[in-house]
Image: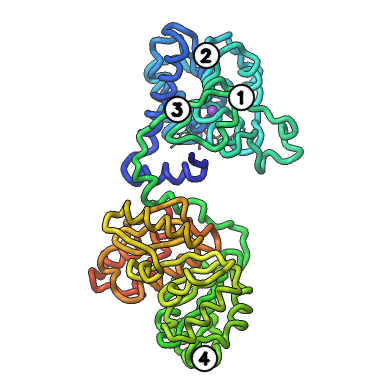
Amino acid sequence: MITTDRMAAVDANAAALGVPRKQLMESSGNAVAREVRALADPGASVELLCGRGNNGGDAFVAARFLSAYDATVSLLGRPESIRTEIARENWDALENSEIPAETVTDAVDLALDDPDVIVDAMLGSGVTGALREPERTAARLTNESDAAVVAVDVPSGVDADTGKPAAGEAGVAGEAGAADPVAVDADRVVTFHDEKPGLAALDADVTVADIGIPTAAERFTGPGDLLGIARDPTSHKGENGEVLVIGGGPYTGAPSLSARSALRTGADLVRVACPETVARTVQGYSADLIVRGLPGDRIGPAHVDRALELAAGNDVVVLGPGLGDGDGTREFVRRFLSRYDGRAVVDADALRVVPEVDTDAELICTPHQGELVGMGGETADDPDERAALVRSFAAEIGHTLLVKGAKDVVTDGDSVRLNRTGNPGMTVGGTGDVLAGAVGALAAVTDPFHAAAVGTYVNGLAGDAAADDMGYGLVATDLIDRIPEAMRDE
Ligand SMILES: NC(=O)C1=CN([C@@H]2O[C@H](COP(=O)(O)OP(=O)(O)OC[C@H]3O[C@@H](n4cnc5c(N)ncnc54)[C@H](O)[C@@H]3O)[C@@H](O)[C@H]2O)[C@H](O)CC1
Ligand SMILES: [K+]
């Protein structure tokens, strides 16, 4: 089962693996033609109703596979308004090949000539809001006809995630068609790659066609995972994340690295709570940080109330960088987590406390394999075996785990993702602090699993860029400056 958003991500990951969308479209179109052949004998009349997006593009391809049929392609709209290059190229291929294709700009001109089969390729996963004209009338005519209706990917006008008529910004009250949503009532649906959540509820036979998306596009993080992190252009300060790093004492560099990394990953405001004896030093590393000193030279149980108060003003806490493993510090982590009910990234010495504490917080733990074992988890050499072990441990403790290694494992106990960006140069000190800060910033704007997957992906990419310039002489601060470039999703 795959949602529309995840499908878009997987599609982009496939392109990055060298399987471009146009190649997938060829497989999709082929699968649609196969479905038509299963329904009707050669010579039967087939009307392909095509929209201007890639859903229509699938049907342009299908037409090339239906030469034994009396097939007619109808494009709803002008060819110049075809929205994507790959759909346009397939439209041009029809024209160049003299395959009958016509354009219908006004729904009143659309006369369905009592075909045996209608292929509904008007709208797929790109639908927003209730159907507009001319698709709306075309859907109604389709539903009134006696033809067998084969929908491409999803019946036009249906939201593939819910199975309900598509709604959204365009579907608000007052919009034409919003009160009386129309959607194609298909007999069959050929959907691609995987089952969609909304299709089972429809009264239609659903076929899932394999279109050649490599398993790796889903299994590994890729540029597609960055989709959905894009920021709202109208957002205000604070809306893109406020992060509190709690750390420092025996160390000063670690909390600073995490905090600066969070800023470079896109957080609006990053605060550091650290012992007052190191506050000046931490502040001295960067003018971009807001530093709050806590009395003394180590964080301990006496600071729990103040830390909770500070945490309440932030979206995410990053707990652990440079805290050390003193008894008082461990007690602080225990008491803090038992009372905190927000979201936190837990790293380094704070990790050991997690399995023994009863907390309402939503945690993302970032252990390396040694720390994982210290938490009570198990590991294995084979990445898939390790992923299975980490997944069940995450389910057991009820938190998201990001286990660092040559192939990182990210899991929330249900979904699993592997990450293979990064390089052996990143074994240098401080890169884990950079990662924790990046995940913290992302956890302020997306769910924990997604934040962990994207965080480790961009951290590794930044490390790869640093290695290009510095070889194995790279240091953690080199990663921080390269995160913004790594966050670009192309
Ligand atoms: N990996 C894959 O899943 C592949 C899927 N393919 C097919 O591509 C479509 C999705 O294509 P996309 O271009 O993103 O969107 P659509 O064709 O669904 O719609 C595009 C277009 O339609 C307009 N529009 C949106 N809402 C409405 C509305 N309510 N009324 C009228 N018009 C509307 C809007 O302008 C959009 O731009 C997927 O379903 C598959 O069929 C490819 O084959 C590649 C592999
Ligand atoms: K469709």
Q: Can the viewer see residue 490? A: no
- Ligand 2 within 8 angstroms of badge 1 C-beta: yes
Kind of residue at badge 3 = Asp
Placement of 353 over or under 21, stated as above or below: below
Number of other residues with Cα within 10 Å of mark 2, as a class: few under 14, some 14 to 19, many 20 or more: many
Q: Label 3's element?
A: helix
Q: Give the Cα distance between marks 2 and 1.
A: 14 Å
Q: Which residue is mark 3?
A: 58
Kind of residue at badge 2 = Val
Upstream in the sequence, badge 3 or badge 2?
3
Number of other residues with Cα within 10 Å of mark 3, as a class: few under 14, some 14 to 19, many 20 or more: many
Q: Can the viewer see residue 330? A: yes
Answer with left or right where residue 469 lies relative to residue 288.
left
Task: Answer whether labels 1 and 3 touch (C-beta < 8 Å).
Answer: no
Q: Which residue is mark 2?
A: 117
Of badges 4 and 2, nearer the viewer stands 4
Q: Give the Cα distance between marks 4 and 3.
A: 63 Å
Q: Residue furthest top?
A: 43
Q: Give the Cα distance between marks 1 and 4.
A: 65 Å
Whole-percent x, y for residue 319 in the image: 49, 75
Kind of residue at badge 1 = Val
Q: Give the Cα distance between marks 1 and 3.
A: 17 Å
- Ligand 1 within 8 angstroms of badge 3 C-beta: yes
Upstream in the sequence, badge 4 or badge 2?
2
**Which numbered marker is on residue 135?**
none
**Which numbered marker is on residue 184?**
1
Whole-percent x, y for residue 331 in the image: 51, 82
Upstream in the sequence, badge 1 or badge 3?
3
Identify the image quadrant of residue 164: top right
Q: Which residue is mark 4?
A: 276
Upstream in the sequence, badge 1 or badge 4?
1
